Image: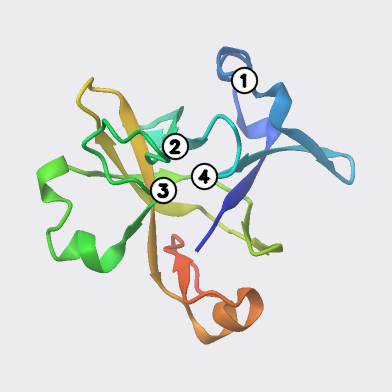
């Protein structure tokens, strides 16, 4: 799967950076600032391109038992295709990322990751990362049988 992403700080507008208090996510890779978004963070969120705008949404539903949303951060491509998410009226979105993280292994992302946005009972948007069966290389590299659905990229 993909438990975290990294995106270059330069790709995030200052107003969005301040609105979501993203300074806590900054790390350095060489001389470039990156923002890390991890599913294990206290505040679980992801950048998303939705209706042509870069926004920050809550990543899945990590533990709100009162919500009707699935208690996960991922959506299997097979489940989406089979219509199992239809009742949530999912919208396809792009999760922009430069790197992904799974089991301690960082991997490069060229364009982004496929995702879906659904709204909870209070009309708050949540993003779920779409996954698919792992390629042989990804499974060997991360020891995981699922991988993110990358946009125009094969690993």
Tell me the CA gap for discs 2 and 1: 13 Å
Q: Residues within 10 Å of mark 1 (few under 14, many from 20)?
A: some
Q: What mark, if any, has residue 73 been given in the picture?
A: 3
Q: Which residue is mark 4?
A: 96
Q: Which residue is mark 2?
A: 48
Q: Nearer the viewer, mark 3 or mark 4?
A: 3
Query: Helix, strand, or loop for circle 1?
Result: helix
Circles 4 and 2: CB atoms closer than 8 Å: yes
- Tell me where residue 27 sits by quadrant: top right
Query: Does residue 21 lie above or below 126 as drawn?
Result: above
Q: How far across and down, in percent of the image, does residue 40 sit?
A: 59, 43
Q: What mark, if any, has residue 130 been given in the picture?
A: none
Of callouts 3 and 4, which one flags the residue occurring earlier in the amino acid sequence?
A: 3
Q: Which residue is mark 1?
A: 17
Of callouts 2 and 3, which one flags the residue occurring earlier in the amino acid sequence?
A: 2
Query: Helix, strand, or loop for circle 3?
Result: loop
- Name the residue furthest front: 65
Circles 3 and 4: CB atoms closer than 8 Å: no
- Name the residue furthest right: 30
Tell me the CA gap for discs 3 and 1: 22 Å
- Tell me where residue 117 sits by quadrant: top left
Of callouts 3 and 1, which one flags the residue occurring earlier in the amino acid sequence?
A: 1
Tell me the CA gap for discs 4 and 2: 6 Å
At 21% from the left and 44% from the top, the residue drawn is 90
- Tell me where residue 93 sits by quadrant: top left
């Amino acid at each position: 799967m993909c438990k975290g992403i990294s995106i270059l700080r330069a790709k995030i507008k200052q107003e969005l950076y301040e609105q979501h208090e993203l300074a806590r996510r900054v790390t350095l890779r060489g001389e470039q600032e990156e923002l890390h978004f991890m599913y294990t963070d206290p505040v679980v969120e992801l950048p998303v391109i939705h209706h042509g705008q870069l926004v920050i949404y809550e990543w899945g539903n990590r533990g709100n038992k009162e919500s009707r949303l699935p208690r996960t951060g991922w959506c299997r491509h097979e489940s989406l295709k089979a219509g199992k998410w239809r009742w949530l009226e999912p919208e396809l979105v792009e999760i922009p990322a430069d790197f992904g993280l799974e089991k301690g292994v960082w991997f490069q992302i060229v364009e982004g990751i496929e995702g879906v946005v659904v709204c909870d009972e209070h009309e708050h948007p949540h993003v779920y990362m779409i996954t698919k069966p792992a390629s042989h290389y990804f499974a060997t590299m991360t020891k995981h049988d699922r991988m993110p659905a990358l946009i125009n990229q094969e690993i």
